[in-house]
Image (spheres, rainbow, N blue to C red):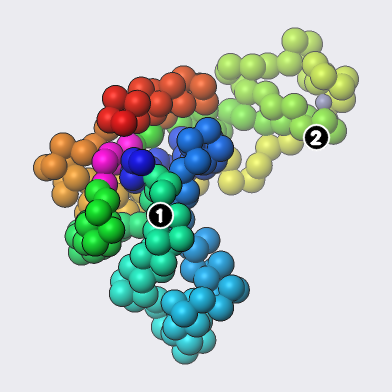
Amino acid sequence: MLNIILLGPPGAGKGTQAARLQADRGMVQMSTGDMLREAVAAGTPVGLKAKAVMERGELVSDAIVSALIGERLDAAADKGAIFDGFPRTKHQAEALDILLGERGRKLDYVIELAVEEEALVTRITGRFTCAKCGTGYHDQFKLPKTAGICDACGSTEFKRRPDDNEQTVRTRMAEYRAKTAPILPYYEERGLVRRVDGMASVDAVAAQIDAILDAGA
Ligand SMILES: [Zn+2]
């Protein structure tokens, strides 16, 4: 039963990998944003507390988030956890150690899906899809066999997502660095950080993550 933090900027495929780890290994994703919404909807003790705070227009405190994670860890006692979106600060990282320690568990790895910014810009700004059937293409890596005609359905209309532009990618990378900068040194010091190539294919990234988890199992 391994407990990991999964880190990766938008476009690195973190969601895909988390979903796969849940399906293949029965791990439980602890995404604090989703957990908060679910706890409020389900009316759990922590959820009720969080709801009252949010209704007053205040930010949910570390204590509430910690309680929420504790609740979720207890509910999935025999399953490995994938933390996503928490911790964001050194204080939260310490709180997570305590939460796990209280349950006889520990954090095993911090796995970062590393991407190279320029390559990510190229990957994201070049992608487009067929407007009719949704088949994905790329300006550099996968053009239709006949220019302007979808290989799959013959349509001549294509579309791009408005946020697939360079500025958005760079802003998200900057946000990601700001978010992880406070916690990476904390985990680096303890030798827990493992980096995998987030620019590789989904299967190749999955294989790299599996190798890390299997080595530590
Ligand atoms: Zn098509």
Please tell me which residue lies in front, 201 or 5. Answer: 5
Left or right: 22 in relation to 96: right
Instruction: Please name the amino acid that badge 1 sits on.
Output: Ala
Q: Which circle marks residue 77 in the picture?
A: 1
Q: Which circle marks residue 131 in the picture?
A: 2
Q: Which circle marks residue 123 in the picture?
A: none
Counting other residues with Cα less than 10 Å from the Cα at mark 1, is it few (<14), some (14-19), or many (20 or more)? Answer: few
Q: Which of the two labelled residues, at mark 2 and mark 1, occupies the earlier sequence position?
A: 1
Residue 96 falls in image quadrant: bottom left
- Image: magenta residue range: 107-111
**Secondary structure under the numbered disc 1 in the rendered image:** loop
The quadrant the N terminus occupies is top left
The quadrant the C terminus occupies is top left
Instruction: Please name the amino acid that badge 2 sits on.
Output: Ala
Which residue does the image show at 33% across and 37% down from the upper left?
111
In percent of width and height, residue 94 lies at 19, 60
Taking the view exactly as shown, the residue that stands out farthest to the top is: 145
**Secondary structure under the numbered disc 2 in the rendered image:** loop
Tell whether position 140 is magenta: no
Residue 161 falls in image quadrant: top right
Please tell me which residue lies in front, 127 or 6. Answer: 6
In percent of width and height, residue 108 lies at 26, 41
Please tell me which residue lies in front, 93 or 148. Answer: 93
Assign the magenta stretch its main secondary structure: strand
- Mark 2 sits near ligand 1, with its Cβ under 8 Å away: yes
Give the alpha-carbon distance from disc 2 to disc 1, as whole Å.
45 Å
Residue 207 falls in image quadrant: top left
Counting other residues with Cα less than 10 Å from the Cα at mark 2, is it few (<14), some (14-19), or many (20 or more)? Answer: some
